[in-house]
Amino acid sequence: MIIKQISVFVENKLGRLAQITDIIGKAGIDIRALSIADTSDFGILRVIVDRPDDAIKALKEAGMTVSLTDVIAVGIPDQPGAFSKAVQVMSDAEISIEYMYAFISRTDREAFVILRTEDIDGSVRVLEEKGIKLLHAEDVYHM
């Protein structure tokens, strides 16, 4: 249920994102989802890939500042109100969501939301109890 997300510290310089994604691509690693949050000087690239350990190795060998973070992936039906139901479960359990980003599956009529919460194990428990679909790491890595 826990997905490994790579976080990369990114200087806000022309071509930096291209450089990072080139390193990942040349290592033969597929990107499944990504998000970038930035300020004027730097950003944090958050990325889910099919082989996180290999991506960490390739990025570190290239001198990048990287870390692995536990996140969860939730499957949301592609219909009005479905996302609201999932986040209401978290709110009712008083679990704060630190950040999230979403992507659409190529094969399913679902959206997938990557969540980082203050309590990963508690989040998994309450979402399962309420029947919210959670994806396994292998499901996400091999989409």
Image (cartoon, grey):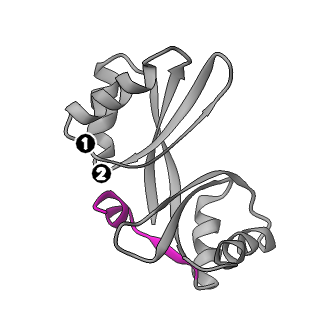
Q: Which quarter of the figure is the C terminus placed in?
A: bottom left
Compare residues 6 and 112 and report the one nearer the observer: 112
Q: Residues within 10 Å of mark 2 (few under 14, many from 20)?
A: many
Residue that label 2 marks: 50
Residue at left offset 67%, top offset 79%: 80
Compare residues 78 and 87 and report the one nearer the observer: 78
Upstream in the sequence, badge 1 or badge 2? 1
Q: Residues within 10 Å of mark 1 (few under 14, many from 20)?
A: some
Residue type at numbered disc 2: Asp
Q: Position of residue 70 (x, y in %)?
A: 50, 51
- Circles 1, 2 touching at the beta carbon (< 8 Å): yes
Residue type at numbered disc 1: Ile
In this rendering, the answer to whether 11 lies above or below 24 is above
Whether residue 30 sits left or right of residue 82 in the image: it is: left
Query: Residues under labels 1 and 2: Cα distance?
Result: 6 Å
Whether residue 58 sits left or right of residue 85 in the image: it is: left
Residue range in magenta is 132-143
In this rendering, the answer to whether 15 lies above or below 85 is above
Q: Which quarter of the figure is the N terminus placed in?
A: bottom left
Residue that label 1 marks: 29
Residue at left offset 31%, top offset 18%: 62
